[in-house]
Amino acid sequence: MNEFIEFCNKMSQLDEATITELERILKLKRASKNEYLAYSNNLSKELFFIRKGIVKFCFNGDGKEFIMRFFEENILFSDIESYTQRKFSKYNIIAIENTEYFSMSFFEFEQLCLKHHKLETFFRKFMVRANLNMMARISEILEEDAKKRYSNFIVKNPKLLERISLGDLANYLGITQVSLSRIRATK
Amino acid sequence: MNEFIEFCNKMSQLDEATITELERILKLKRASKNEYLAYSNNLSKELFFIRKGIVKFCFNGDGKEFIMRFFEENILFSDIESYTQRKFSKYNIIAIENTEYFSMSFFEFEQLCLKHHKLETFFRKFMVRANLNMMARISEILEEDAKKRYSNFIVKNPKLLERISLGDLANYLGITQVSLSRIRATK
DNA sequence: TAGCTTATTTATCATTTGATAAAAGAATTG
DNA sequence: CAATTCTTTTATCAAATGATAAATAAGCTA
């Protein structure tokens, strides 16, 4: 049972048949540092599960890069917007480290969900959890200024901090890299 | 078939048995303007579906109010965080207009999801859609300044705009009411 | 290691937003 | 309708952040 299956299984116990079918749609892939797992302006139809490494999920606007999230080991994600709305993606997915990941067709995964109730339950629970993360992010952006968001980040993600650049962190926090540097200086 | 059932049915067609059981757990409730549908610092275990009216889903920090979202007619929502993590809510749910809504036990709804695959599918799809909203919100906050967020809001939500106060709108946009007034002045 | 490239810091000035107070306008109530 | 309360605007000053440029620092490659 690979990492992804275990990830699903933890939230909703799957039976053998489901696991077998799930394994069948998984493909193991690799991306080197700075390589793109997916490009904006394309239809994105993949689900990703990081096995080793980190990626950033980001978009560009007015020459600047904005990072929606970092995804590290044992996280499932995808460009839901592009897939569910069948529209060109605004996001890039870029490896920050050499990365090994499972990839699967979103459509095939969804078909398995419709076929196997337990897998559908997993997916629902997973989406609920994803929602909590987003809510927390939004409420933090509303409530706290950049200095506080930075200090929260280093407390909550000490390990991640060591693996990403300050430029990427700034793009995640929603401030310029120069501004982050200034914040770091005033400790 | 009431508004809520129709809402579910549109995303995932339910069979009769499911509908009957779903109807059984629904309670129709009312809240007058400014009345609380739910208080922070409580365990929140309800799912809400607005039939008529508007509410704000908000929290307080440092004496200020921050609005996560407005919920109007035909929207399903709940304090997922409090329910799924069994912890005291940070959110208030407050009626902005006289509001009529369906309320149901989150636990009972979840049980129905585990029992009826189609309902589980609805719930999953619903959560996916909720995620898209949140993503859009985050990316907008990262990318745009307050002036642009305001102008986006009035374009995207012209009807909602007429039903909420500028103070509430400011709390939603993440700026002070005074700052919003200033932005409105410089057209 | 030297040279090149990228990442980070520092500095300066402009712009945006916040905090506060006060005035003007609207809505509510007796 | 007058008084009261709540909402919105205007004004002033302070603080935070952005834009830009330049200086260091760190990392990479030949």
Image (cartoon, coloured by chain):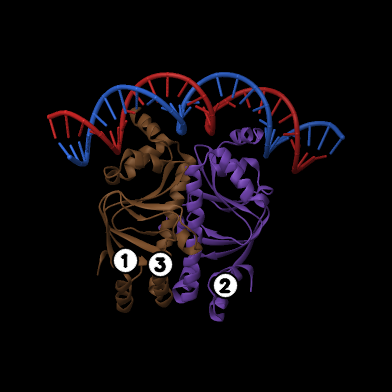
Chain colours: A purple, B brown, C blue, D red
Neighbourhood count class around disc 2 (C-alpha, 10 Å): few under 14, some 14–19, many 20 upward: some
Residue bearing mark 2 = A9
Q: Nearer the viewer, mark 2 or mark 3?
A: 3
Near-viewer residue (A146 or A81): A146
Q: Secondary structure at mark 3?
A: helix
Specify the amino acid type for callout 3.
Phe
Neighbourhood count class around disc 3 (C-alpha, 10 Å): few under 14, some 14–19, many 20 upward: many
The reply to whether residue A57 is visible in this rendering is yes
Specify the amino acid type for callout 1.
Lys
What is the CA distance from the residue labelled 1 to the residue labelled 2? 29 Å
Q: Kindly check if marks 1 and 2 are in contact, taking CB atoms under 8 A apart as contact.
A: no
The residue lying at 54 percent from left, 80 percent from top is A17
Specify the amino acid type for callout 2.
Asn
Residue bearing mark 3 = B106
Neighbourhood count class around disc 1 (C-alpha, 10 Å): few under 14, some 14–19, many 20 upward: few
Residue at mark 3: chain: B
Image quarter in which the C terminus of chain A is found = top right
Q: Kindly check if marks 1 and 3 are in contact, taking CB atoms under 8 A apart as contact.
A: no
The residue lying at 51 percent from left, 62 percent from top is B85
Q: Secondary structure at mark 1?
A: helix
What is the CA distance from the residue labelled 2 to the residue labelled 3? 23 Å
